[in-house]
Image: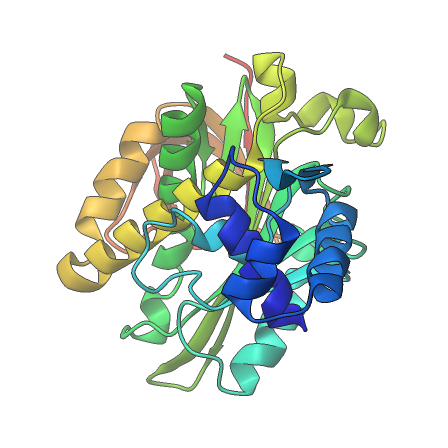
Amino acid sequence: MEGSKHQVLDYLRRHRGEYISGEELSRQLAITRTAVWKHIQALRREGYRIDAQTRRGYCLLGTPDCLYPEEVAVGLKTSWLGRQLYYYDEVGSTNQVAKELADNGAPEGTVVVAEAQSGGRGRRGRLWLSPPQKGIWFSLIFRPRVAPTQASQLTLLAAVAVAAAVRKYTGLPPGIKWPNDILLGGRKVCGILTEIKAEMDAVEYIVQGIGLNVNAEADDFTPDVRPYATSLFLELGRRVARLPLFQEMLYQLEKWYERWQEEGFEPVRSAWKEASVTLGREVAVNSWREVTTGVAVDIDVEGALKVRTAGGEVRRFTSGEVTLRPV
């Protein structure tokens, strides 16, 4: 039954702007007129705008701003990333769903996307607000051919790819705060959470969760978060269509991932440095044991942040939370 509904949608999409009679749909798809009507009603409930006129038939006028797999697949430029897509109206956490899929053998490139998350997580278990249809909340499964010590490079790679997609689609100039926070106007618009399952010498899989605030309004953020968070809507002053932006994000992620696997970390490192809003700035790095202040001078070949302290010592951080000091 579900397959027939998608056939009706696909037929209307291929004849967009035309009126197709129920009789023709019934004949072309080898289903009853009653089944055609039921599928049309189901599509309307999902947000598709379908006009119906006596003696003319049905016409697809518009599609919803939802990340349905059948919509994502149309025009998707990737070869393998997102070709297997699990869609949910709401989940606790897309990362949790993706980890369960990965543990059960889901292939590299599998993507889990949700319109809302009730338990989205940021760094160190903090809550990540994921209101319905206000952002792009998704997780990806990777199985890279790298040593576990190199897995953290994928975090910086994702920041580079997301920043490139936002820049290309909106014209906004996103910056990256080490290691992977995407900022606009000094406020966070996207967070990336990377989780790894590995043995001593091999990565089994990496699940990467990405949350991009797209059409969130100021009131969607809690008062404690509001001064530090933003969205594409707040920066542009207009709503942004999520579907083509999601497709561009998947394309950029696949492109950069393949380049990383073929050429190593240096191209990623170079692109990250170009988009960085961290390097050259006074920073405070909370490594959870202590807070170190100084000037961020570089990231090394493994993606670690190098900070020169007031005493001239250059310290290296593979993890920690960076706060940018006021310019």
Tag count in the figure? 0
Position of residue 144 measured from the top left corner of the image (x, y, whole percent)? 32, 71
Where is residue 295 shown, x and y percent of the image? 40, 28
Instruction: List x then y, in percent, for residue 146.
Output: 28, 73
Coordinates of residue 5 in the picture (x, y in percent): 64, 62
Q: Quadrant of the N terminus?
A: bottom right
- Left or right: 298, with 176 as reference point: left
Give whichever of 53, 113 is nearer the camera. 53
In the displayed structure, 224 sits above or below 118; it is: above
Q: Is residue 57 visible?
A: yes
Q: Nearer the viewer, residue 165 or 27?
A: 27
Q: Name the residue at 49% across, 86% down.
A: 105
Q: Nearer the viewer, residue 276 or 106?
A: 106
Color scheme of the displayed model: rainbow
Q: Is residue 291 above or below residue 97?
A: above
Q: Is residue 260 left or right of residue 153?
A: left
Left or right: 67, with 258 as reference point: right
Which residue: 61% across, 68% down? 4
- The part of the image, by quadrant, that contains residue 124 is bottom right
**Which residue, as the protein is rendered here, is positioned at the far left?**
263
**Is 222 drawn above or below residue 263 in the view shown?**
above
From where the camera sits, is residue 315 visible? no
Q: Quadrant of residue 19?
A: top right
Q: Quadrant of residue 220?
A: top right
Residue 18 appears left or right of 250: right
User: Between 34 and 131, which is closer to the camera in this rendering?
Assistant: 34
